[in-house]
Image (tube, grey):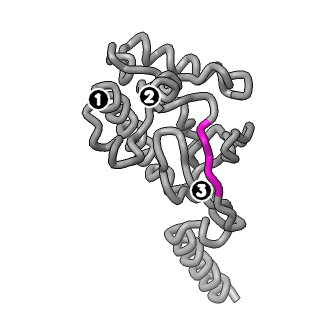
Amino acid sequence: MEKLTKHILIWLGIAIIILGLMGCERFFGVSGDLVERVSDGDTLAVKDSQGNKFTVRFACMDAPEIPHSNKEKNSKSASDRNQFSWGVKAQQRVQQLVQQGGDRVKLNITDSDRYGRKVAEIRLKDGTFVQQVLLREGLAKVYRPYLNKCPSKDLVQQAEAEAKQQKLGVWSDAKFINPWEYRSLYK
């Protein structure tokens, strides 16, 4: 009987090690929504656990614009080039963060916008608050008209203040035009 118990314990230990190496998510489901595409510095295309696809706009902030058409991509306008340069940097940073999170995010949906997108605070599996990172690095600005719908408004305002004080990202660029002003002036 003692020999049987020893064999059972050995096999049980081996099974636990194998399951650990394979990752528990395979057996207990994955956490968060799958990011299918990073559209720009403040918009994601995601698929939830039921297979529903939708677009998510980042709550609390606004990132610089990226070029969408060939005309915009080939623009010689200094304000376009400036806006798009920062927009691409923001988009690339979001892509890095999403990859760091295993292409999964946790959404705290706070609203929906006039385009039918869900507006949400975005966090990675490890708890990293994506908006806070972008604001702290100066790759976005707090979008104050909708700050009242932002549960983490103190965090985002503090992150922006740090970037502004340290002149990081767009805060280092005297020619940068706020994304909302750029859209109203140039679109």
Mark 3–mark 2 Cα distance, whole angstroms, equals 29 Å
Residue 106: within the magenta? no
Report the mark closest to the observer, 1 or 3: 1
Q: Nearer the viewer, mark 3 or mark 2?
A: 2
Circle 3: residue type: Val
Name the residue tied to disc 3.
46
Q: Residue sitting at 49 percent across and 56 percent down? A: 37
Q: Looking at numbered disc 1 in the image, what kind of residue is underneath it?
A: Ser
Few, some or many residues within 10 Å of mark 2 (<14, 14–19, 20+): few
Corner quadrant of residue 139: top left
Name the residue: 58% across, 77% down. Answer: 15
Q: Secondary structure at mark 2?
A: helix
Who is closer to the viewer here, 127 or 144? 144
User: Circle 3 sits in a helix, a strand or a loop, which is it?
Assistant: strand
Category of crowding for the residue at label 3, using alpha-carbon neighbours closer than 10 angstroms: few (below 14), some (14–19), many (at least 20): many
Q: Is residue 73 above or below residue 48?
A: above
78 left or right of 134 in image: left
Q: Is residue 32 visible?
A: no
Is residue 152 left or right of 76 when viewed as pictured? right
Q: Is residue 164 above or below residue 187?
A: above
- Asked whether the residues under the numbered discs 1 and 2 touch, taking CB atoms below 8 Å apart as contact, a structural biologist would say yes
Tag 1 secondary structure: loop
Q: Which mark is residue 77?
A: 1
Q: Which residues are magenta?
A: 54-58
